[in-house]
Each structure stands twice: as structure tokens, then as C-alpha cells.
Image (cartoon, rainbow, N blue to C red):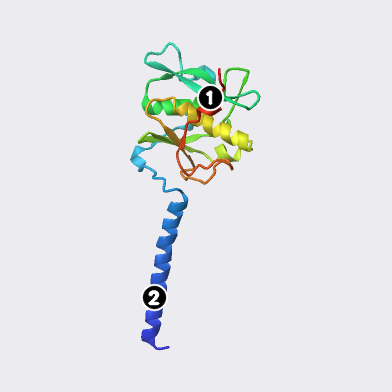
């Protein structure tokens, strides 16, 4: 093979590898469901200590002005339904999401309710875009979860149903360490924003 033919072969090999790389990137985007992650300037970074304050220093105080009442959803004792527990939150759009997640991590006050979020999970960042709340958890949200399809469902939808109580939020997109994963807790598809499920709420 002459030098010219060799150069042509090298060029063709480079072009094929380049096109393969482009196709692979497009395929990864398609597999992830084409979820558009908003740019960094829309993200609201959360300090972990803001979420894990002990109860006596909780930012939620009933004597503060400009408070709203929201329902937080926890599992009932039989793990059959989600049941609401009311909390008072400051009326700040971004902070409400952070505080709702923080209160879910702390767990329920009622003895007949069960925690749904691993206690060592941290919210790394949160932002809202076009009605979707993007919640980016630390890896502990996944690795310290107790598992099972019921536990998967109750954890995800306790968060989704709680956050969709807030004005302007219609769905929740879950991320782990900044990445969208196919099934964060092993069962439910988390490649797309998840909408509220009222059928999981305990009928009165």
C-alpha cells in the first residue's frame, strides 16, 4: 500500500470514529428520554446544613409572617397509602422546595406515619423550570434506600406529591449527583419528570 493510500485510510478511519462518537452521544440523549436539563444559572445550590437542622432550630415556625400551609406525604403504618401531614412554610418559591425536602428527610411527627426518605440523603441543588422541579440528591438517596418496589414508589411519590402541592410545580425530575438515571431506586422509571399520583393518597 502506497503512502497516499495509507493517508486516505487513516483519514477515513478518523472520520468513521468521529461519526461514531456523534451517534453515541445522540443515542445516550435518546436513551435518557431527551430530558432537557436547564443551564447552571437556573440552579439553586443548597447547603446540606440547611436541610438537616435539628427540630429545635427548624426554619419552620408557626409565628412567622407570610407562611403557607402545605401537605407533606409520608407512608402509613401498613405501607399501603401515603398520608398527609401539614407543615407551615415560608412563602418563598425556591426556599419552599428546599424546606419541603428538608422536612421529608427529618421525617413525620405523627407516630402512625413512617419516614420515606433516607435520613442521610442530601439535596445538592434544586431549580424550577417550566413547571418541573429538578431535585438533585447525593448518592446516599440511592445507596441507603431500603429497597423494594413499594419502598421505591412511596419514596418517589412522597416527594412528588409533596412538591406538587406548591404553586407552579406540576412534576418532579430526579437526579443523582447531577445525572439523570434510568431507575434511581431500582424500579420506577426516572428518566422523565414524574407527575403526581393522587391514587396513592389514603382516602379519608
Residue 171, visible in the rendered structure: yes
- Among all residues in the image, which is located at the extreme left? 41
**How many numbered discs sit on the rendered protein?**
2
**Image quadrant containing the N terminus:** bottom left
Percent from the top left, x then y, of residue 4? 36, 85
Q: Quadrant of residue 7?
A: bottom left
Element assignment for label 1: strand
Query: Is 112 displayed left or right of 84 in the figure?
Result: right
Q: Quadrant of residue 118?
A: top right
Q: Are marks 1 and 2 in contact (CB under 8 Å)?
A: no
Nearest the eye: 33 or 128: 33
Q: Which residue is mark 2?
A: 12
Q: Earlier in the sequence, mark 1 or mark 2?
A: 2
Q: Above or below — where is 169 with respect to 175? A: above
Q: Which residue is mark 1?
A: 73
- Among all residues in the image, which is located at the extreme right? 78
Mark nearest the camera among 1 and 2 is 1
Query: Is 52 displayed left or right of 126 in the figure?
Result: right
Percent from the top left, x then y, of residue 26? 41, 57
Q: Above or below — where is 204 with respect to 13? A: above
Mark 1 crowd level (few <14, some 14–19, many ≥20, 10 Å Cα):
many
**Image quadrant containing the C terminus:** top right
Nearest the eye: 71 or 135: 71
Residue 52, visible in the rendered structure: no
Distance in Å between CA atoms under marks 1 and 2: 58 Å
Mark 2 crowd level (few <14, some 14–19, many ≥20, 10 Å Cα):
few
Q: Quadrant of residue 93?
A: top left
Nearest the eye: 137 or 165: 165
Q: Which numbered circle lies on residue 204?
A: none
Percent from the top left, x then y, of residue 124? 46, 37
Percent from the top left, x then y, of residue 41? 33, 40
Element assignment for label 2: helix
Amino acid at each position: 500500500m502506497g503512502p497516499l493510500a495509507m493517508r486516505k485510510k487513516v483519514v477515513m478511519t478518523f472520520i468513521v470514529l468521529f461519526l461514531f462518537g456523534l451517534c453515541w452521544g445522540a443515542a445516550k440523549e435518546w436513551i435518557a428520554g431527551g430530558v432537557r436539563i436547564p443551564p447552571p444559572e437556573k440552579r439553586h445550590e443548597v447547603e446540606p446544613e440547611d436541610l438537616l437542622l435539628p427540630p429545635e432550630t427548624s426554619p419552620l415556625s408557626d409565628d412567622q409572617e407570610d407562611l403557607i400551609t402545605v401537605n407533606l406525604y409520608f407512608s402509613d403504618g401498613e405501607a399501603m397509602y401515603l398520608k398527609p401531614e401539614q407543615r407551615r412554610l415560608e412563602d418563598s418559591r425556591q426556599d419552599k422546595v428546599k424546606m419541603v425536602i428538608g422536612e421529608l428527610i427529618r421525617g413525620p411527627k405523627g407516630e402512625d406515619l413512617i419516614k420515606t426518605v433516607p435520613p442521610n440523603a442530601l439535596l445538592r441543588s434544586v431549580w424550577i423550570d417550566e413547571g418541573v422541579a429538578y431535585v438533585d440528591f447525593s448518592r446516599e438517596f440511592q445507596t441507603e434506600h431500603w429497597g423494594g418496589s413499594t419502598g421505591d414508589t412511596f419514596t418517589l411519590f412522597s416527594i412528588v406529591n409533596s412538591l406538587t402541592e406548591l404553586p407552579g410545580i406540576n412534576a418532579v425530575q430526579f437526579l443523582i449527583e447531577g445525572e439523570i438515571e434510568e431507575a434511581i431506586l431500582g424500579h420506577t422509571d426516572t428518566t422523565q419528570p414524574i407527575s403526581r399520583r393522587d391514587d396513592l393518597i389514603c382516602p379519608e
